[in-house]
Image (cartoon, rainbow, N blue to C red):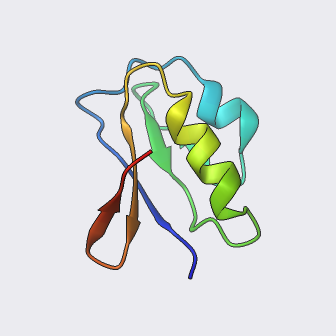
Amino acid sequence: MAYRVEVDQDLCMSSGKCVADTPQVFAFDEDEIAEVRAEPGEVSDEKLVEIARHCPSGAIRLLEGDREVLV
């Protein structure tokens, strides 16, 4: 089962790591805050965990159903 991705825009500090590493999933909105542009699709759960772990502000959340995945 593929993880669902959310970005807590109140926590996002716009470092751009997620956008640079997986532009098919993340983009900047008009305020330069990361947002999910599409469900991960071909991006593996392992890659999503890596992206979430390296988010400097901890703004990326991964969910499996209704349960948050600890990264």
Q: Is residue 51 above or below residue 64?
A: above
Q: Is residue 57 above or below residue 58?
A: above
Nearer to us in this view, 56 or 31:
56
30 left or right of 54?
A: left
- Image point (61%, 35%), residue name: 18
Residue 3 x %, y %: 51, 68
Q: Is residue 40 above or below residue 11?
A: below
44 left or right of 7?
A: right
How many tags in the picture? 0
Q: Quadrant of the N terminus?
A: bottom right
Q: Quadrant of the C terminus?
A: top left
Q: Residue furthest front?
A: 70
Nearer to us in this view, 14 or 44:
44
- Image point (63%, 62%), residue name: 45
Residue 17 x %, y %: 63, 26
Nearer to us in this view, 3 or 17:
3
Residue 52 x %, y %: 51, 40
Residue 33 x %, y %: 42, 29
- Image point (72%, 54%), residue name: 24
- Image point (57%, 48%), residue name: 49
Q: Quadrant of residue 35?
A: top left
